[in-house]
Image (cartoon, helix red, strand yellow):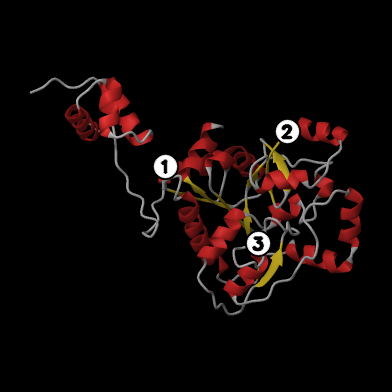
């Protein structure tokens, strides 16, 4: 019987084949091995448990990573955690499908529902089955619009798309989420048509929200649209914001960031968001880890749905 191959060689060949995508012939040339040797090494890698092949079927039932769920629940004090096994490519669809299932389950018996915007929220809405609930829930925006980001492929806003899926009508907030002037925000909040919607939004029983990370995706646009002065930028940087929820920024410890950014946002307040009985947050993509970690520390979320790669990175940063 041939001697067991050196583990380092097996790992090297496996990385080149599975991680870097090299063919067996290319590996043989690079490592000065025969192609048959490379094939035997890859077979041995599986036999010895060095390599495990996991098949993720995006159309099949979700596979949950219970060990990661328990860790997140313990570290962040969450009520419920869903971590989905997925490849990086399938993470958006798999996470959105589970988010839709969780949100649908929570809808039973709820009379008032709130929603934010963002790619994760859009993806969850795409995965929702048409609901015919009795009584139909009232639907409210938790935050103003962000025209470049809150559109689905059909051109409908997140709010309208969700209203269509639920078979109900939505109250509309005809104002942007982020403004350049704190004074303008105060003036808009004083308008009865806007104040009434925000006051009602603060009383919802269930909220579906995305989780942002500063400098990534929609969070980048949130800060850009504030048009902070140089002095304000210095203050903002000193506050070290990492994440956002409903355009409200938090630092790595989950503390709500104050002015100047706080005063530029038209949305439910952070305290109002925390007071909502059930807030379901959905996020995917490992690049969001800093922001997700900060938001999870804030206490604003009750239930969270994440892909496994994002969940591992969030835990690795604690």
Label 2: few (<14), some or many (≥20) within 10 Å?
some
Q: Secondary structure at mark 3?
A: loop
Residue 181: x %, y % from top left: 88, 49
Whether residue 275 sits left or right of residue 3 in the image: it is right
Q: Quadrant of the N terminus?
A: top left
Q: Quadrant of the C terminus?
A: top right
Q: What is the distance, in whole Å, between disc 2 and disc 3 at their CAs? A: 30 Å
Q: Earlier in the sequence, mark 1 or mark 3?
A: 1
- For the point 90% across and 54% down, which residue is it? 184
Q: Earlier in the sequence, mark 2 or mark 3?
A: 3
Residue 269: x %, y % from top left: 77, 53
Whether residue 75 sits left or right of residue 224 in the image: it is left
Q: Quadrant of residue 177?
A: bottom right
Q: Is residue 53 above or below residue 154?
A: above
- For the point 61% across and 74% down, which residue is it? 164
Judge whether residue 222 can be spotted in this image.
yes
Circle number at residue 240: 2
**Which residue is labeled 3 in the image?**
151
Q: Secondary structure at mark 1?
A: helix
Q: What is the distance, in whole Å, between disc 2 and disc 1 at their CAs? A: 31 Å
Residue 98: x %, y % from top left: 48, 58
Circle number at residue 67: 1
Q: Quadrant of residue 163?
A: bottom right
- For the point 85% across and 48% down, which residue is it? 180
Q: Quadrant of residue 255?
A: top right
Label 3: few (<14), some or many (≥20) within 10 Å?
many
């Amino acid at each position: 019987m041939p001697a067991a191959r050196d583990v380092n060689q097996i790992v090297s060949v496996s990385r080149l084949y599975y991680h870097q995508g090299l063919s067996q012939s290319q590996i043989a040339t690079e490592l000065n091995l025969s192609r048959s040797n490379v094939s035997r090494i890859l077979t041995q890698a599986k036999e010895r448990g060095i390599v495990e092949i996991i098949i993720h079927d995006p159309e099949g039932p979700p596979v949950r990573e219970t060990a990661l769920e328990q860790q997140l629940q313990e570290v962040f004090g969450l009520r419920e955690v869903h971590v989905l096994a997925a490849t990086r490519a399938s993470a958006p669809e798999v996470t959105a499908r589970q988010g839709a299932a969780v949100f649908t389950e929570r809808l039973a018996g709820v009379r008032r529902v709130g929603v934010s915007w963002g790619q994760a929220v859009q993806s969850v809405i795409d995965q929702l089955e048409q609901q015919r609930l009795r009584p139909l829930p009232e639907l409210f925006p938790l935050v103003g619009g962000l025209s470049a980001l809150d559109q689905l492929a059909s051109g409908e806003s997140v709010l309208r798309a969700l209203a269509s899926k639920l078979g109900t009508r939505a109250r509309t907030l005809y104002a942007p989420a982020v403004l350049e002037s704190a004074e303008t925000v105060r003036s808009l909040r004083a308008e009865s048509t806007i104040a009434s919607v925000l006051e009602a939004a603060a009383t919802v029983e269930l909220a579906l929200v995305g989780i942002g990370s500063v400098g990534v995706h929609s969070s980048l646009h949130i800060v850009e649209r504030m048009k902070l002065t140089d002095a304000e930028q210095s203050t903002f940087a000193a506050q070290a914001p990492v994440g956002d929820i409903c355009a409200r920024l938090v630092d790595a410890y989950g503390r709500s960031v104050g002015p100047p950014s706080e005063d530029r946002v038209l949305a439910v307040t952070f305290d109002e968001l925390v007071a909502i009985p059930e807030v379901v947050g959905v996020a995917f993509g490992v690049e969001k880890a800093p922001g997700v970690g900060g938001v999870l520390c804030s206490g604003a979320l009750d239930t969270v749905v994440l892909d496994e790669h994002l969940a591992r990175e969030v835990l690795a940063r604690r």
